[in-house]
Amino acid sequence: MVGGFNAYFSNIFEVASTVFEGMAVTFSHFVRKPTTIQYPDRMAIRVQDTLPYRYRGILEVDLEICTGCLACERACPIDCIVIDAKKDKSTKKMMLNRFDIDIAKCMYCGLCSEPCPTGSIHHTPEFEGADFSLESMMRRFVKQPVAAYKPKKVEDDPEVAPILERGMRYLDEFADPAGKTGTDS
Amino acid sequence: MSIAGFEVEVDRGRGLETEEMTLNMGPQHPSTHGVLRFVVKADGEIMRRAIPDVGYLHRSIEKISEKVGYHGFMPYTDRVDYVAAMFCNQGWGMVTEKLADIEVPKRGEYCRVIAAELNRISSHLLSVGTMILDIGAITPFFHAFREREKINDLLEELCGARLTYNYMRIGGVAWDLPPGYEEKVLAFLSQFDRMLEEYDDLVTSNKLFRARCSGVAAISPADAAAYNLVGPNLRACGVRYDVRRDEPYSVYPELEFDVPVGTGSAGAVGDSFDRYLVRILEIKESIKILRQCFQQIPDGPVVAKVPRKLKPPAGDVQIRVESARGDMSWYAVSDGSEFPYRCKVRTGSFAAMGMIEELSKGLMLADLVTVIASLDIVAPEVDR
């Protein structure tokens, strides 16, 4: 019977000590820096600004540099991009009549932004896309038909040049497999 | 017979009759992590049978492959097993490369292994964290998820998403490692080593946790082979089998790592505690692999030149990837067109799911939760 008593009390002792071991780890966290962040309203900077450069958020299109090549529409595996680009007979210019992206369908895979020749279609770090209706999830970029961008050797239009520069930088840093330097996150 | 003034009549003729109960566990049960249903035949608290009812999360991913083509299917493979999506990416990449005879550049392979091993750590952390949560301890779960969050941050920087990575492409990976990535991962790993020690103090050496898991649902190697158990579940039974070592793919032959197996340190070989411990040991092996990868990674391109409209020659191939949940096998048939004719995935969770009915016989109802958690079943991977 003595052995039984010993085992009984040593069991209690071991369990109590194992609980205290665990509690020691837990209590040590009272003096450590917290790792939680108070999203969304008590942040020093917006979450969107802390995200890495490659972050795939809601898609954005710069129509000024869109060439109407339909590469993104073909690459999209769920057909959430719809583009209507036609050649105007009278002016002989490629006209963009429609450029819609259904954000409700989009799965943010990034396959569309890779083949884009100018970096027109790109991901933004925005991710808060909740809305009350499916219709408002449809992003219509073409308000009225515009002429598609025609690539030139040197871009001299002061309005388009900075947008194109941003687009090409996006392609270099984001979609280029050689992996040139991205912005620091 | 009178109790406190009440007259109670007791029928002494037939005695108390017991009857088998049929209980439903799930589909919406907090410990099943996903939509998973069990029909439990129980005698009081003892289970006679627990019949898994699969199919709630079927999304016909294999059928979708026949409609979207080889490149377009890559983001869908993320959804096969959303906890360890890198392995599904890698599986689809490898099967298509074998079909179309594409060679991946060396740096691309190393990028793949780095991403996959980071993902393995995060998947195992989720697995052991939620296992302990299901058993009844909540603190270690937060510790595991804190580290997992850091890995998610690293993977987010690498490929732009935290869960559905879509990082790999046919012929390599989408993007090279970002600048300063090596330092960030190594800094994380050195800090993670300390966290693992703390985790061991908190859980692995905890007597209550050992007592709860020891001997629960022990699997013999013969049973494991009969039910086709794979991955950490198989290794916990003492079988030293790892696809990375026994049927090497990618750059794994150039890397040195051990294959941990269960030793029965808490009770029987192949019990729930062994399955937990094998995962913890595998995390340590993954850290070893990651450190070697950063030493050995060569310069060069990360992706081979692959036509946008990929048309592999007709034929069928099968490859295997050691996923976080074990041997994941990918089978694809091409008929020479730009869409796969057929694609089939076989995953580790499915095999583990088939074993539950056998394992649950004679266990307590509360142990079913331990069995599900220790087998690391991810519901969407079962149904696809």
Image (cartoon, rainbow, N blue to C red):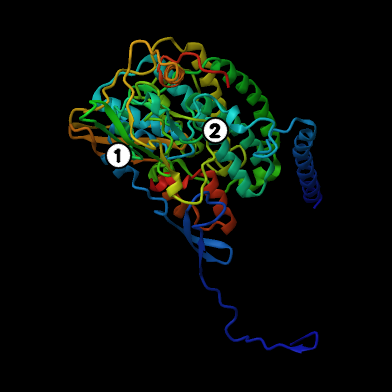
Quarter of the image for the C terminus of chain A: give it: top right
Tell me the element at label 2: helix
Chain designation of label 2: B
For label 2, the residue is B122
Real-space Cα separation, disc 1 to disc 2, in angstroms: 27 Å
Name the chain under label 1: B
Q: Amino acid at mark 2?
A: Ser
> In the shown orientation, is residue B188 left or right of residue A182?
right
Q: Which mark is residue B231?
A: none
**Which corner quadrant of the image does residue B16 belong to?**
bottom right
* Neighbours of disc 2 within 10 Å: few (<14), some (14-19), many (20+): many
Tag 1 near tag 2, CB within 8 Å: no
x, y percent for residue B345? 34, 40
- Report the residue that reaches farthest toward the front: A90
Find disc 1 in the rendering and name its residue: B65
Residue type, label 1: Ser
Please name whichever residue, A90 or A160, is drawn nearer the observer in this view of the structure: A90
Q: Nearer the viewer, mark 1 or mark 2?
A: 1
Give the crowd class for mark 1: few <14, some 14-19, many >=20 residues within 10 Å. Answer: many
